[in-house]
Amino acid sequence: MLRCLVSRCFLTNPVAGQTRKMSGGSLAGSQSSLAGKVAIVTASTDGIGLAAAQALGQRGAHVVVSSRRQSNVDKAVAQLQSEKIQVTGTTCNVGKSEDRERLVNMTVEHCGGIDILVSNAAVNPFFGNIMDSTAAVWDKILDVNVKAAFLMTQLVVPHMEKRGGGSVVFVSSVAGYQPMQALGPYSVSKTALLGLTRALAPELAQSHIRVNCVAPGVIKTRFSQALWQDEDIVDEFKKQLSIKRVGEPEEIGGVIAFLCSKDASYITGETITVTGGMSCRL
Ligand SMILES: NC(=O)c1ccc[n+]([C@@H]2O[C@H](COP(=O)([O-])OP(=O)(O)OC[C@H]3O[C@@H](n4cnc5c(N)ncnc54)[C@H](OP(=O)(O)O)[C@@H]3O)[C@@H](O)[C@H]2O)c1
């Protein structure tokens, strides 16, 4: 059963864009402020999702964090609360429709609406030659990495429309531009997100909802530890980088928060690559 760990949304104002006192007080009134906004970040109890929640929260948004495991949700909520971020936590496996619906309903019920969706969840159950990948692998990867991103968007859009607009950010990967060795199906799913961004942006612009995407390079998280823990692989990667180091989750979180802010009010349908200078093109 989905259990909610709710830190009261008592500071959350149901009206989009309205400012009030919040943790990112120094930003209040500035273009980067997200005061009064409610942000759902999927897969946000660790790594890039948690860093995105932090960045949004530091700018004044009330963040709703979630992932599959209650213990991870509890830890993330405690960490964000200790950083004076307004936060609500719940479990949600984005691959399950009932979980997606409960996440959205719980957010509206407790926080009064939704302004921001960061669709960050992804799985990679397969390493090897793409020709050896099975239908089950493709189903899992496409269900979680692509279909759930779209279906979450479909669920939140009516709530964003009620607020007069909103912002959606998908988390793709540099692998979406250049498929990574042994990660064929995962890479294809990340390319699909670039297409999803472009397909949604014109349609949702009519509702004042911007849709953008970030494509991180190699970022130091649990998900990518097989890459950055191996010195030989890191040395090989560094040859492709202008900035000769692996990235940090916060370096993605800040870009996501920028895309959700008024600073990015004229940006939609775009993917920002955040790779330390790796050359990326399709
Ligand atoms: N790290 C990189 O180098 C890198 C590079 C490019 C793109 N990315 C992308 O960045 C995103 C985040 O990756 P990360 O590196 O930050 O991973 P991470 O540090 O391993 O964190 C993964 C998070 O996702 C949650 N999660 C996993 N499966 C989930 C599901 N089905 N539903 C809901 N939550 C789920 C995990 O918590 P639970 O276990 O509790 O569910 C955890 O909070 C992914 O889309 C990934 O493809 C990462």
Image (cartoon, grey):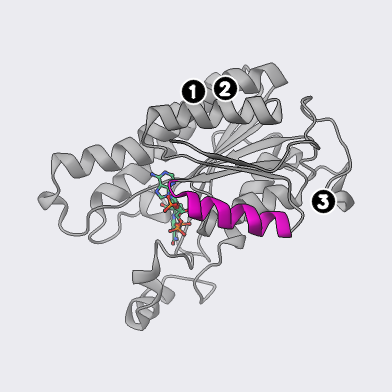
Circle 3 SS class? loop
Instruction: Give the mark count.
Output: 3
Relative to 164, say whether 22 is above or below.
below
Q: Is residue 75 magenta?
A: yes
CA separation in Å, label 1 and label 3 = 30 Å
- Magenta stretch, main secondary structure class: helix
User: In the rendered structure, which disc, 3 or 2, sits on the residue that comes first in sequence?
Assistant: 3
At x 54%, y 73%, the residue is 243
Judging depth in this view, the residue of 143 and 262 nearest the camera is 143
Say the numbered circle drawn on residue 154: 1
Q: Which mark is residue 216?
A: none
- Which residue in the protein does label 3 denote? 24
Q: Type of residue at label 3? A: Gly
Mark sitting earlier along the chain (1/3): 3
Tag 2 residue: 157
Q: Which residues are magenta?
A: 68-82
Query: Could you tell me residue 253's position as x and y percent?
Result: 61, 54
Badge 3, how many Cα within 10 Å: few under 14, some, many 20+? many
